[in-house]
Amino acid sequence: MTPDEIHAFLSHGTRTAKLATSGPGGQPHVMPVWFVLDGEELVFTTWGASVKGRNLRRDPRAAVIVDEEVAPYAFVHIRGHVTLSEDLEELLRFATAIGGRYMGADRAGEFGRRNAVPGELLVRLRPERVIAAADVAG
C-alpha cells in the first residue's frame, strides 16, 4: 500500500487497532483500542492505571495491527514509540474525535467529556516501521 492508501485504510469506518505492549516481565499484552489519526500518528486514550497505561509508562515501545477481516483481507502493522499526555484540552479534543468516529456525531461530545478526565492518558504512536498489505487472498 502507498502512504495515501494506508491513511485511507486506517481512517475507514470503525476498524479497531489491536495494541501490543510489554508487561514488566516481558510478557505480551494485546488489547483493542479505538483511535484516530493525527498526521502520521495513531492517537488513542487509555486509563493511566490500566495495564496498557502502566505498560506504556514503563516502556514506550508499542505495536498495533489494524485489519480487514473479510476477503480479500488487508492489514496495516505499525511499530514505534509512544508519547503520553495528560493535557485535558488535548484529551477532550481527541476523545471527542474518537467518540465521533466510533459512536457517531450525536454521541461524540458525551464520549469526549467522559474520557477527558484526570487519570486518562492521550497516547500518540509515532510510526517507526509500517508493514501493509491489501488483497492478501488475491
Image (cartoon, rainbow, N blue to C red):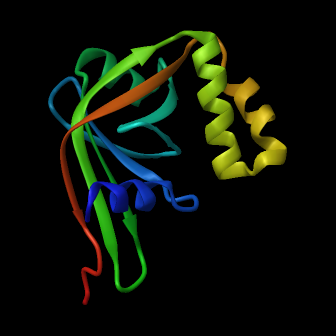
User: Is residue 13 or residue 21 the one in the foreground?
Assistant: 13
Say whether residue 22 is left or right of residue 64: left
Quarter of image, res 113: top right
Residue 15 position (above or below residue 58): below
Residue 119 position (above or below residue 62): above
Say whether residue 45 is left or right of residue 21: right
* Residue at left offset 57%, top offset 58%: 14
Give the number of callouts.
0
* Residue at left offset 34%, top offset 78%: 73
- On the image, the x and y values in percent for residue 38 come to 46, 35
* Residue at left offset 50%, top offset 28%: 46
Quarter of image, res 133: bottom left
Question: Which quadrant of the figure contains the N terminus?
Answer: bottom left
Question: Which quadrant of the figure contains the C terminus?
Answer: bottom left
Say whether residue 97 is left or right of residue 62: right
Outermost residue, right side: 106
User: Is residue 7 or residue 85 the one in the foreground?
Assistant: 7
Outermost residue, bottom side: 138
- On the image, the x and y values in percent for residue 116 come to 66, 20
* Residue at left offset 37%, top offset 64%: 67
- On the image, the x and y values in percent for residue 82 come to 31, 25
Residue 137 position (above or below residue 4): below
- On the image, the x and y values in percent for residue 2 come to 26, 61
